[in-house]
Image (cartoon, coloured by chain):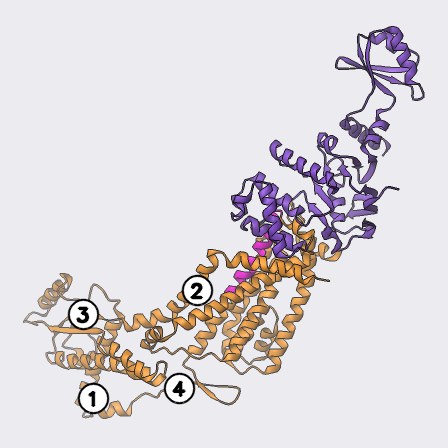
Amino acid sequence: MVSLPRIAAVIRREYLERVKTKAFWISTLLVPIFLGAVMIIPAWLAARGGGTFSVAVLDFTGRFTEPIRTELDDLLETSASTATEELEETGVVPGEQAEAVGEMVSEPLLKLELVPLEVGADPEAARNRAKQSVHNGDYDGLLVLPATLPDEGQAEYVSPNVSTFQMLSVLERSVNNVMVASRLTAAGLDPDRVGELTRRVDLKTFKLGAKGQETHDQGQGFLISYVFMMIIYMTVLMYGIYVMRGVLEEKSSHIVEVIISTVKPFELMLGKILGIGAVGLTQFLLWSLLMIAITAPGAAAAVGMGGLELPAVPAIQIIFFVVYFALGFLLYGTLYAGIGAAFDTEQEAQNFQGVVTMFLVVPLVLMMYILNQPDAPLSVALSLFPFFTPMLMFLRMTLTQVPAYQLVASVVLMCATIVAAAWIVGKIYRVGILMHGSKPKFKDLLRWIREA
Amino acid sequence: MTDAILDIDHISKRFGDVTAVDDLSFSVPRGSVFGLLGPNGAGKSTTIRMIMRIIMADSGRVLLDGEPVDDDRRRLIGYLPEERGLYKKMKVLEHLVFLGTIRGLPPGEAKKRSQAWLESFELGDWATHKVEDLSKGMQQKVQLIGALIHRPQLLILDEPFSGLDPLNTRVFKDLLLKMAAEGVTIVLSTHVLPQVDELCTHICLINRARAIINGRLNDIRAEYGGNVWRLSGELDREAIAALPAVTDVQPLGDELLAELAPDASSRELMAALAAQGGLESFTRFVPELENIFIRAVEEDRANG
């Protein structure tokens, strides 16, 4: 029989030793900052794609500079005001705050000033003069509207820096809009009327929940589940390797024999896995608290600026996220414990470690298939395979309505696999922790299992 | 029948084709300092590991105070393995408290005792340092404290002096002698024989998985000494060798060793020597443990 006080003493030691390290607190702090950055910075950058640009214009048609300037101002102003509207509409931030945030962004961040240049008699000479002044830094760029523009639809932009996408896109859109309007007018049509008639359809996607409720989903739901899946992958891998290193350290420091003269090897293994798992759960808890703090008003505003909505993750998914992390860690942690026990150094353990890690990586490869066909029989089967369950079943949960029996089956299957793995690995562990010297081969491990 | 604290009763262990321990039996008398001796690979550590249930005997039993050792009762034994270490990142005091709690002490008590022990080893200032900051000698003291912290009545030490500098060897020996004086039974395995002479009251010599000598050290010495006498003075070697009962005479430094026929009387030799004159001392020769060890191992090899 296992002794609970002894296991508790081991768990306590493993837990405190790791929670007290700087590395634990650094990773606890850095990961949410990193995740937040991944989510917020693109939105922030998009919103901040601003700056003031001065663009010289060589208008060989002689009549489009002014309409383009007007269109440009219109576009820049609408983009600022839609940001405010979106904020209110999505409800990410309550009404009053949306206004405040809206004010922040209502000032167009991107300013574009068009400076018409003399065309003169010699087009080539005018071009060269203009290029030279761009080169000298008088302007950020040069927009050339050739005389053939209305027919051929080709304009040119010359600049030392052509990667200012936000500005280029606005510039292109305004030139385009003006040209389309001009052609429509030439064909005797009213540009406003045509615009109204050809307005695009907005396809809003909704995910049907268990109780028939619909959740508005703009794809961020998937983004979140992808991030969560990656967190399961990384934490199971990271904490699994901690277990392996812990066992290797006990072997190489020769503490293990002192311990197992009073604690059974199985108790030591169990205590180590549970202690390190508890560190993982603690980290999740701290991450959640930090994420809640980060996504509080100020940061949400930054997210809102990019028009990105932080979707509410259903409670059931959060529960299963923790359940699948815990089960996945128990399964992989047990395997890594066995590997740590069998070998003397991490280098020696590399091959076997690679095999186990591969089981964790395969779901990442299978992800695309599951994404496209979450309910296909193969997807169901793969997500029920205990080594893939933590990631794939969780992914399916976020994509589709997984029947309750499948969730129950996945948990039962995983628990059974964990017990079997603990039983087999326990034998390898018992023999392995006292072995030093020659590197065991696979058949040696099988012999240990048979004989122990 | 002496009172035995530990009985090893016909234990055997095979690893694949190798017999590490073959039907080994011995008893450790209560209060003794018991030396488990033998050449490298004789099976000393395997025997100790079986006593501690770190590996399981294929057959036979181990009795502590007459009761079989199980996973709970083995914690009554203080054990210092040959391969010993500490968690390097742990603080010294926390480490000792951990070792105390897995040996069944309440944390508060474990802390109190650890502090007392650290003070007595002059390590009090190091209690809150990490183990890795300690010198090797200090770490060895911490390991020893870990084995003693639950005040065991039986202490089993596998090669306790290996890796110790002379100063720490002295500290360890003094501590062991002090504990022995307090009635703690000590079993130690070693192949450093002078230490056995200094510490042990009983020995068991293991060779090739079996016990070849077992008993009280003084009895064994007397037995292996044989009918050999140590002579000093102004002596004539040739004349002594010519005496009828004497089978051999060997020099030993300035002295002589005279071996008599097994049934010959030492009185006759003394009388004869007194007649020759020049005899200053006449004592029974007590062989060095090393000689006994080598002789026993060689005899065993010849028999096998």
Answer with the quarter of the image where residue A223 lies: bottom left
**Total numbered labels placed on residues in the image:** 4
The residues tagged by marks 4 and 2 sit, at their Cα atoms, a distance apart of 32 Å
Asked if residue A14 is positioned above or below residue A310 in the image, the reply reads: above
Residue under label 4, please give it. A204
Circle nearer the N terminus (2, 3): 2
* Residue A355, image x, y percentages: 59, 59
Residue under label 3, please give it. A53
- In the picture, the disc for residue A184 is 1
Circle nearer the N terminus (1, 3): 3
Q: Residues within 10 Å of mark 1 (few under 14, many from 20)?
A: some
The N terminus of chain B, quarter of image: top right
Helix, strand, or loop for circle 4? loop
The C terminus of chain B, quarter of image: top right
| Chain B shade | purple
- In the picture, the disc for residue A31 is 2
Labels 4 and 2 within one chain: yes
Label 1 close to label 3 by CB (< 8 Å): no
Report the magenta stretch's main SS.
Answer: helix
The residues tagged by marks 1 and 2 sit, at their Cα atoms, a distance apart of 53 Å
Letter of the chain that mark 2 sits on in the rendering: A
Q: Residues within 10 Å of mark 4 (few under 14, many from 20)?
A: few
| Chain A shade | orange
Labels 4 and 1 within one chain: yes
The residues tagged by marks 1 and 3 sit, at their Cα atoms, a distance apart of 30 Å
